[in-house]
């Protein structure tokens, strides 16, 4: 397996003109491959969490064991540093961003349009009961992945649809953090004189300054 | 995931026997079982597991409910896929890494986005617990490069997970400042004197060792396959 460099990939796309933002191939790529890539990457994370990390002779600092076991049941006397999330505050914060739906990758109308194209060819594309593709299926001679056939088919159908002067909406990227208004904070009561005397901090001789250089050295790499 | 099951040793032995898991086997049974494992391995190696090392493959077999002794499985992999084993030898760790010690779980959550697939519209964001290397939070979507998206993802993660990590460690990306704000506000709710510096650490991306190292594992196991596949097959098809 060779890794194709981004540069070479860009060159290829530029010369063939296959990638240009809001076009049929963007929609088709998302519609066909997002469920597959999600399943693969989430599956890989589950596998990683369950696999055993080895003890290493030259690296005594490495904690051996399975991530899932180490996380939920750390060996004594290791303490858990987590705290319970304050539910009220979490709800307040969530309300400020509830308009954004992170799992959406295409708007409902576009999803439905693509799904209709798939459903109209359910037999050829071997559409599963849940409306998706089985991405392990290989068809034809020479053998081709079914999802590849589905992608080309969908892309061509969408190009035709868009060429006829129709429009398909895309999901919006949630920009505008600049205008975001955070929920009001209840400020702690601070005695200004006490603050200046430094007794609000742990050290008694003035405010404790943190050596940021030390903070950044949390992993020699 | 964290259910506690009380079980006596005898019941455990009985359960294992019912599943056909014995300590010793007759040679003929062993050969037959080898055939079954070989069939599963061949199917897995055709998929994306071809890039997994033997320990991940071993865990994968356990997930599929195929019990097999580790050494026997290693032998089978070497028989079935000698080229794959040889190619993975070059991936052996030859970078000298420094010591990285963390006090315990939820002490540091190391977060970052992975953008090797962004070109095609797929963006990944994940958080890894620095002590246990447990992936507490992972998301694949079309947008993990805006502050609002990352804030929403983090809050959703907290809602589902219920545990607030002590410190978040990230690089100085423009997408992190709202998450940092929200994280510190949640800590101030618990302790009004909570210091920002204690609960959020900004630093260089290269020193954010845990997550960056995990991206390397994930790229080797998963995303390179897709990147090469989409670039080569999909766009080379016409």
Image (tube, rainbow, N blue to C red):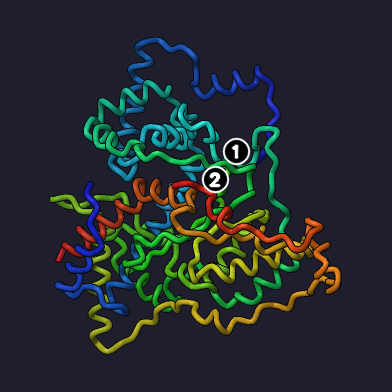
- Whether residue A31 is visible here, answered yes or no, is no
As rendered, which of B171 and A8 lies closer to the eye?
B171
The label on residue B134 is 2
Q: Callout 2: residue from which chain?
A: B
- Left or right for A21, reference A191: left
Q: Identify the element where label 1 is drawn.
A: helix
What's the residue at 83%, 67% (across, down)?
A197
Task: Give the quadrant of residue A65.
Answer: top right
Residues marked 1 and 2 touching at CB (< 8 Å)? yes
Residue at which label 1 appears: A70
What's the residue at 23%, 46% (across, down)?
A1
Q: Callout 1: residue from which chain?
A: A
Mark 2 neighbour class, 10 Å CA radius: few under 14, some 14 to 19, many 20 or more: many
Task: Give the quadrant of residue A84.
Answer: bottom right
- Whether residue B169 is visible here, answered yes or no, is yes
What's the residue at 45%, 79% (across, down)?
A172
Residue A17 sits above or below residue B220 on the image: below
């Amino acid at each position: 397996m060779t890794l194709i460099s981004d540069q070479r990939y860009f060159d290829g796309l530029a010369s063939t003109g296959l990638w240009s933002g809001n076009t049929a191939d963007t929609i088709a790529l998302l519609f066909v491959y997002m469920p597959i890539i999600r399943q693969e990457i989430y599956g890989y994370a589950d596998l990683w969490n369950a696999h055993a990390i080895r003890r290493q002779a030259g690296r005594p600092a490495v904690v051996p064991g399975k991530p899932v076991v180490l996380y939920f049941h750390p060996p004594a006397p290791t303490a858990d540093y987590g705290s319970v999330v304050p539910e009220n505050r979490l709800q307040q914060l969530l309300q400020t961003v509830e308009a954004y739906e992170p799992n959406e990758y295409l708007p409902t109308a576009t999803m439905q349009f693509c799904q209709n194209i798939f459903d109209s060819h359910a037999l050829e594309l071997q559409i599963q009961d849940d409306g998706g593709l089985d991405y392990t299926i290989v068809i034809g001679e020479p053998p081709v992945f079914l999802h590849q056939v589905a992608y080309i088919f969908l892309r061509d159908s969408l190009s035709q649809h868009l060429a006829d002067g129709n429009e398909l909406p895309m999901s919006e990227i949630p920009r505008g953090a600049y205008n975001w208004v955070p929920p009001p904070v209840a400020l702690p009561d601070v005695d200004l004189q006490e603050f200046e005397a430094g007794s609000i901090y742990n050290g008694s001789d003035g405010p404790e300054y943190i050596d940021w250089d030390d903070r950044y050295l949390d992993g020699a790499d | 995931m964290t259910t506690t099951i009380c079980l006596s040793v005898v019941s455990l032995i009985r359960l294992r026997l019912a599943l056909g898991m014995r300590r010793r086997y007759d040679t003929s049974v062993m050969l037959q079982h080898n055939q079954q494992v070989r069939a599963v391995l061949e199917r897995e190696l055709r998929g994306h597991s071809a890039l997994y090392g033997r320990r991940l493959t071993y865990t994968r077999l356990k997930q599929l409910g195929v019990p097999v002794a580790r050494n026997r499985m290693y032998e089978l992999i070497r028989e079935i896929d000698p080229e794959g084993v040889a190619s993975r030898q070059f991936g052996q760790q030859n970078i000298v890494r420094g010591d990285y010690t963390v006090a315990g779980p939820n002490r540091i959550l190391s977060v970052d986005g992975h953008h090797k697939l962004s070109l095609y519209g797929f963006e990944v964001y994940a958080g890894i617990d620095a002590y246990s290397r447990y992936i507490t939070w992972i998301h694949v979507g079309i947008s993990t490069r805006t502050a609002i998206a990352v804030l929403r993802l983090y809050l959703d993660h907290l809602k589902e997970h219920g545990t607030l990590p002590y410190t978040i460690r990230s690089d100085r990306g423009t997408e992190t400042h709202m998450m940092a704000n929200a994280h510190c506000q949640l800590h101030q709710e618990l302790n009004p004197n909570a210091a920002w510096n204690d609960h959020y650490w900004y630093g260089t991306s290269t020193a954010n060792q845990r997550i960056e190292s995990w991206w390397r594992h994930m790229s080797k196991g998963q995303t390179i396959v897709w990147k090469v596949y989409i670039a080569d097959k999909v766009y080379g098809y016409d």
